[in-house]
Each structure stands twice: as C-alpha cells, then as structure tokens.
C-alpha cells in the first residue's frame, strides 16, 4: 500500500487529528530523550482505545509496515525511536490514559498503557493505597513504557521492579489480535507465565495496552536521611547494618558520589544546602506501619550508634516532608543536571552488591590509565546493586570529542561488570544503544532462545525492528 493510501486508512480508523504527518507535528516523536537518536516515520498514529490499537496494528501488518510503539518517550536507550529509513508507523499510546478500576480489597489497579506514572501513584493514594514504582521521570513517563523496559526506580529494594508489580496484561500482538490477560491473581499456575515475555521486551513482541498492577497499604510513617560515608565499601557495609536493623522498612538506599552532587548544585540550585562534606553519600528512606515517633526514634538511635563506632561520618535527618523532598530532589535531578553539563558516556550496570566497591575501584583505575582527565559521575540504587556510572572530561568543552571514545570506554566498563558477575543493563534496557553489545555478554543459547521467541510471536519482524535483537 502506498504511503498516502496507508495514511488515509489510518485516518479512517482513529480520526484525522490523531494521525500526525507534518514534520513539525512528528518531530517530538522521532528523537529520543537524550537527543542521540533521530529517526523518520510514515506518520505518528495516536489511537484512543485497545480496539483502535488493534485495528492500526492489523492494518500495518496486512501491508507489511513496521510498527514502533511509543509511550512517554523518556527512555534512555533509543528503544522508542524509529529507524532513520522512515518506513515505520509510530504508535503513540498517550490517549490510552484511563484508570479502569481500583480494587481496594484485592489491592490491585487496572490501568491503560498511556497513564502517566504520576497519575497512577496519585490515584492509588486517593484510594489509601501505594503504587511504589517511583522514577525521576514519573511526571512524563507512561506505564506502558515502564513495563516494556521493566523499570526499576528507587524502591526496588523493598517492592521489586515493574515485573514484580504486575499481575496481568492486555497486549495487542503483531497480527493485531488482542491477548486479554487482565487478571488480578497472585497465584495462577496454569502454564507459562506469558505476561513476563512482554515485560522488558521493549515493544518487540507486541504493544502493552493495559495492565493490572499491585497496590500496597500506605505507610503510616516515612523517614528520610542523608548520610556521609568515606567510601563505597563503607556504604555497602552500612547498607548491611541498615537491613539488619530495619528489615523491610528500609524502602530505598541510594549511593551518590560528591561529583554527582556538585553537578546538581551547579546547574539546578537545589536546596538542602547544609549537607556534610564527604566524597560519598547515601540517601535512605524508611517507611512502614510504625508510628512516626517510634520510627524516628529508631533511626536516630541507629545513626548515633553508627557515628560513634565509625561506620558513619555524619548524617542529616529530614525533619518534615518538605526537607525530605529537598533531599530527594538532589538525587532525582542528577540526570537532568548531567544533561545540562554536556554529553557524557553513560552506563547502567547491575552487580552483586558485595562487589560494587571492587567494581568502582577497578573501573576508575582502568579508565584513569586509558583516559587522563576523566571524570566519573557515580550514583544509583546501591540497595539492589544498580549503578549509574557515567564518564566525561573534566573540561566540559572536551566532551563532544570524548564521545568518540565510547567503544573503548564501554569495553572497559562492560567487560569489568561482566567479569564480576554483573549485567550491562540494569533498568534502562537495550534499545539501539546496547543492541550490538549484547552478543558479547549473552550466551549464544540465550540469544537463540530470544530469537526463537521473536520469530514465534512476530515472524515478519514488524514490531519495533532494530531494537534489542
């Protein structure tokens, strides 16, 4: 089918205002958040229901046209950006934004894929429940994209990532058929758990259109503290003591280098100025069913003892919710501050928590030897072993040229992570950015199995081509 005929058919399905064809209208959908990848497309289609998604996909499949699913377009690996060739249709899910139901007794919520993560969290709170997935981009990211990349965030330590927070899915398959598995069951031992194929698949197997999500009781009390520590080793040790003392009440534990903190302060002028000077920091959160006074007393006692015996250099305890938000703003704005600082070479690695200090030490040694005047911005979810480890030159003016060294830097970082039992992608996915790196670190049998699944579900390779595999 010729381009104009295809566009007319899509207009018939979803309405003229929901098929974008001009360069200006399509432009925001053709570039990734970091501005690294820019593609082209026949058009951008914005269906308003699962039935419309199904009809759009079936029409594209009938005519052999590739499909690129797109949520909030906040991904960091180019998975939602079409290829430059321009033969694909981008399917945006923003209009699928209804919260279909909240089941308080079952502690579940059924939502459409285009719902903003912020809105889902707010709707859960309005029902006196908690949806714990929390990301810096929650005001713009959509839950369909979160599930397609198996998003993590700051509360994985206690609640798990997106995979653990999902009970059921509704998915439009590459044929246009709709697989409806919107069941709020915590036990369902009736064969393969098919929903797990689509979570983390980056839209290469189908388009998630709705999901049943787990909810939790709202915590009665929350405490936030900023801790100064001497080294990553001291941070890992302190994490162990925090877990021994507080167990599941330790909701989040974030490692932040002083380099990362200073970049945020330089570019975003965040508050919380009276923080102790230190080469490394931990941002921790406790939450649970204890009353506020009991939780604060327990945390204060722990921090005093840790300071006395040298496990902790210093600490700042948030005295109210506003101070807690100020501390979290320092952590959540690191990515935006880095972007303002200029381009850098970014990594999202996962490692056993026990080897994080070794990884940081060995990586700094190897990178420093290969690239003098290198600066590493280190931060991440130390509680689950996920480290964001980014390199740039000390002089920001040198960074564009430094990007040419990406293959060498990646090889040092990724080889070391792999040797220490880690992964080259913890929560950002593969997309275009790491697609060609994957064969170096995946067993051939793993890749063969992934390709077999892809062929079985998408035999013509029309669903998000060029991503992941």
Image (tube, helix red, strand yellow):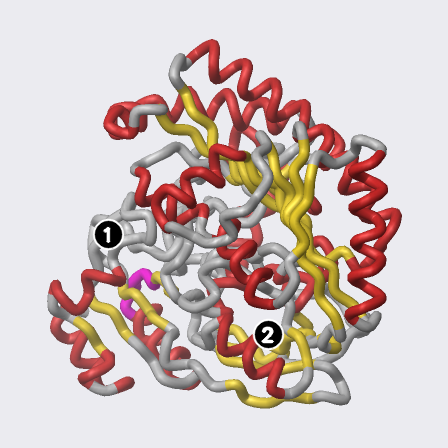
* Mark closest to the chain's N terminus, 2 or 1: 1
Classify mark 1: residues with Cα within 10 Å, few (<14), some (14-19) or many (20+).
some
Q: Could you tell whether 419 is left or right of 189 in the image?
A: left
Q: Is residue 429 visible?
A: yes
Camera-side residue: 210 or 236? 236
Residue at figure coordinates x 32%, y 54% from the top left: 81
Residue farthest toward the top in the current orientation of the protein: 369
Q: Quadrant of residue 224?
A: bottom right
User: Residue 371: x and y, percent?
Assistant: 40, 14
Residue farthest toward the front in the current orientation of the protein: 274
Classify mark 2: residues with Cα within 10 Å, few (<14), some (14-19) or many (20+).
many
Residue at figure coordinates x 27%, y 62% from the top left: 29
Q: In which quarter of the image is residue 293?
A: bottom right
Kindly identify which residue carries mark 1.
Answer: 39
In the rendered image, the quadrant that contains the N terminus is: bottom left
Q: How many marks?
A: 2
Camera-side residue: 27 or 124? 124
Decide: is 171 above or below 301: below
Q: Could you tell whether 260 is left or right of 163 in the image?
A: left
Q: How far apart are marks 2 and 1 (CA)?
A: 29 Å
* Residue range highlighted in magenta: 63-67
User: Residue 264: x and y, percent?
Assistant: 42, 45
Element under disc 1: loop
Q: Residue 342 carries which label?
A: none
Decide: is 322 above or below 18: above
Q: Is residue 64 shown in magenta? A: yes
Element under disc 2: strand
Q: In which quarter of the image is residue 305?
A: top right
Residue at figure coordinates x 60%, y 25% from the top left: 360
Residue at figure coordinates x 31%, y 70% from the top left: 60
Q: Which mark is residue 169?
A: 2
Decide: is 267 above or below 104: above
């Amino acid at each position: 089918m010729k381009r104009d005929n295809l566009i007319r058919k899509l207009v018939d399905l979803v309405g003229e205002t929901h098929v974008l064809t001009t360069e200006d209208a399509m432009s925001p959908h053709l570039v990734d958040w970091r501005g690294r990848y820019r593609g082209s497309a026949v058009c951008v289609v914005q269906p308003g229901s699962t039935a419309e998604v199904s009809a759009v996909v079936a029409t594209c499949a009938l005519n052999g046209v590739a499909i690129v699913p797109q949520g909030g377009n906040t991904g960091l690996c180019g998975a939602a950006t079409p290829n430059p060739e321009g033969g694909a249709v981008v399917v945006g899910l923003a209009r699928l934004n209804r919260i279909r139901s909240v089941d308080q007794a079952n502690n579940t919520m059924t939502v459409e894929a285009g719902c903003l993560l912020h809105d889902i969290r707010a709707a859960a709170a309005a029902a006196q429940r908690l949806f714990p997935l929390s990301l810096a981009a929650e005001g713009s990211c959509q839950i369909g994209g979160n599930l397609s990349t198996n998003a993590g965030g700051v509360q994985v330590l206690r609640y798990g990532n997106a995979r653990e927070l999902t009970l059921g899915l509704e998915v439009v398959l590459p044929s246009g058929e709709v697989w409806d598995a919107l069941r709020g069951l915590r036990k369902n031992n009736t064969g393969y758990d098919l929903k797990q194929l689509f979570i983390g698949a980056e839209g290469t197997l189908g388009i998630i259109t709705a999901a049943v999500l787990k909810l939790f009781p709202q915590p009665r009390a929350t405490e936030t503290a900023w801790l100064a520590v001497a080294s990553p080793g001291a941070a890992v040790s302190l994490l162990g003591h925090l877990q021994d003392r507080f167990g599941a009440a330790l909701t989040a534990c974030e490692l932040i280098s002083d380099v990362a903190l200073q970049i945020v302060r330089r570019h975003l002028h965040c508050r919380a100025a009276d923080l102790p000077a230190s080469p490394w920091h931990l941002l921790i959160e406790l939450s649970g069913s204890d009353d506020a006074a009991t939780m604060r007393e327990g945390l204060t006692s722990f921090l005093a003892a840790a300071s006395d015996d040298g496990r902790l250099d210093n600490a700042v305890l948030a005295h109210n919710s506003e101070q807690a938000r100020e501390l979290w703003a320092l952590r959540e704005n690191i990515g935006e501050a880095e972007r303002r600082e200029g381009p850098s070479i970014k990594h999202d690695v996962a490692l056993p928590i026990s080897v994080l200090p070794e990884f940081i030490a060995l990586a700094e040694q190897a990178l420093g030897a290969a690239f003098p005047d290198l600066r590493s911005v280190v931060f991440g979810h130390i509680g689950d072993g996920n480290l964001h480890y980014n390199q740039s030159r000390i002089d920001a003016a040198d960074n564009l040229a430094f990007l040419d060294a990406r293959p060498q830097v990646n090889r040092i970082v990724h080889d070391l992570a792999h040797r220490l039992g880690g992964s080259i992608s913890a929560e950002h996915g593969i997309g275009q950015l790491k697609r060609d790196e994957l064969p170096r670190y995946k067993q051939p049998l793993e890749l063969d199995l992934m390709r077999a699944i892809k062929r079985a579900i998408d035999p013509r390779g029309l669903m998000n081509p060029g991503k992941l595999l």
